[in-house]
Amino acid sequence: MLEQIINSLNGFLPETALIVSMLVTIILDLIIRKKSVVVTAVGIAGLLVSMYFAYLQIGAKAILFSGMVVVDPFSVFFKMILGLSTIFVLLFTTVSKEIQDSTHKNEHVYLMIAMALGAFLMASSVNMLMMYLSLETVSLTSYVLAGYTKRVKRSSESAMKYIIYGAASSGIMIYAMSLLYGFTGTMNIYETSIFLSKVNLTGNPLIVISIIMILAGFGYKISSVPFHFWTPDVYEGAPIPVTAFLAVTSSAAGFSVLIRFITNSFLAGALVQNGNFVVIPGVNWKEIIIVLSVASMILGNFVAVWQTSVKRMLAYSSIAQGGYILLGLSVANQQGLAAMLIYLMAYLFMNLGAFYVLILIANKLDTDELIGMKGLGYKAPAVCVGMGIFMFALSGVPTTAGFVGKFYLFTALIESKLVWLAVVGLMNSVVSLFFYIKVLKYMFLMKPEDGSTQKLQFGAGAYVIMLLLAVPTMFFGIYFTPLVRIAEYSISMFGFR
């Protein structure tokens, strides 16, 4: 037992690095006793160390802690995505007026690292109990972060709503997992698959009911319809860096555990045959995913059209983006999963970029309303051009990373004879272009209400961070081979039997 634990710890180094950095930042916060960029810098250093250990695990395959978590290229991929997004969000907090003006000192740093730790565990979990515990680790810290600016009424309101919805969805999910455990006698998803492959599930409603109830937990994490009700209010009420963290890091973690649970629990025999999943007869999870995907795209895009708050608009946009990503899972083959990973890599840069520009604008205007951004293109042309890049990328305009992600998703659908679903996705992309362009319309085609064209000043650091997000968004839209290779490699070795 001791030898097994020691061997497991050797494969647990990325998570160990996060635990150590979290403890160090807590101690530093107690020593410094004031807001300090040093604590943030230490947190970023810890994340870089964790990502380095994850990088060393590329190509490795191991089961840790008696089958609770695994190390494989799929988990390594998500650890790199989650670590990078957390680093960017910590950089956002250094320039965010909401975070800097809050009554707290540096609590956001170790809360975000704790959330990243939970996200790492979500990406590696192969046991339903571990999936639940890691999801709760992410959720509990995100509740606190959502209400971080406690003096702002809407922030406290958003945290309360988040807790209520989170508690309900988590309770439903763990109950469904208990039903599945009672039926199969195991919490391990691979053993679950083996058991279900040996029994006749035709006409058995228990499995379908369990899938739907478990999707209540995972769907809440990825803001999928109909588990999305918390998203607009929480995104609007939380500080913008926290909103960005929930939209990218938390959602990516949700997709990682959803993909692993669905594709490994309900497959018969080997993981794939000729690139296609062998689904256990009687388990119609593909139809459920298609319904959730279409509903998320339609509701997210059409409701976003009517929003006047950019934060709220991006909230509904995130719901729709989750719907696009789910399209890859509905295909039920390796090509679809690879398309999902490609889109998630693009989503990291373009969505974080949009939220970062919103932080810069809100710092100067003290509002995220479209009406307050009239003529902003005259006052802050560089920042508004950056917003334009991210808006076009989110809508899927060619030469951006967002186009590449949607191209691979729609291609996977067409090659799997789901042309109608690709058409639905394409039509929703056209609708999304309307409200993304509306932001640029206010910025560039309207004059400032006060008639002033005085330039707004931003520091050099603000432009550097924006470029770190804008350049990859454009670069990977033109040269996307690295994204495709990384995604295909991560999926080619996906699964552990």
Image (cartoon, rainbow, N blue to C red):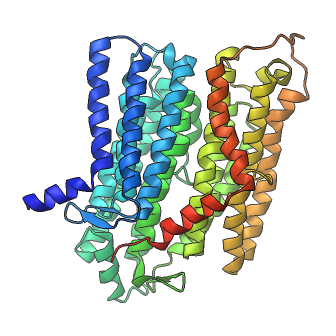
Q: Is residue 78 above or below residue 39?
A: below
Of residues 299 and 57, which is closer to you in this image? 57
* Residue 129, quarter of picture: bottom left
Of residues 119 and 138, which is closer to you in this image? 119
Report the side of 310 relative to 278 (left or right).
right
* Residue 438, quarter of picture: top right
Report the side of 8 relative to 163 (left or right).
left
Tag count? 0
Q: Name the image quarter holding the N terminus.
A: bottom left
Report the side of 257 relative to 299 (left or right).
left
Q: Name the image quarter holding the C terminus.
A: bottom left
Q: Residue at x 32, y 40 (%)?
A: 18
Which residue lies most toward the left here?
2
Q: Is residue 172 above or below residue 109?
A: below
Q: Residue at x 52, y 33 (%)?
A: 89
* Residue 271, quarter of picture: bottom left
Pinpoint residue 210: horizontal percent, then vertical percent: 39, 68
Q: Is residue 186 above or below residue 311?
A: below
Residue 394 in sight here: no
Q: Residue at x 61, y 30 (%)?
A: 465
Residue 79 in sight here: yes
Pinpoint residue 336: horizontal percent, then vertical percent: 59, 70
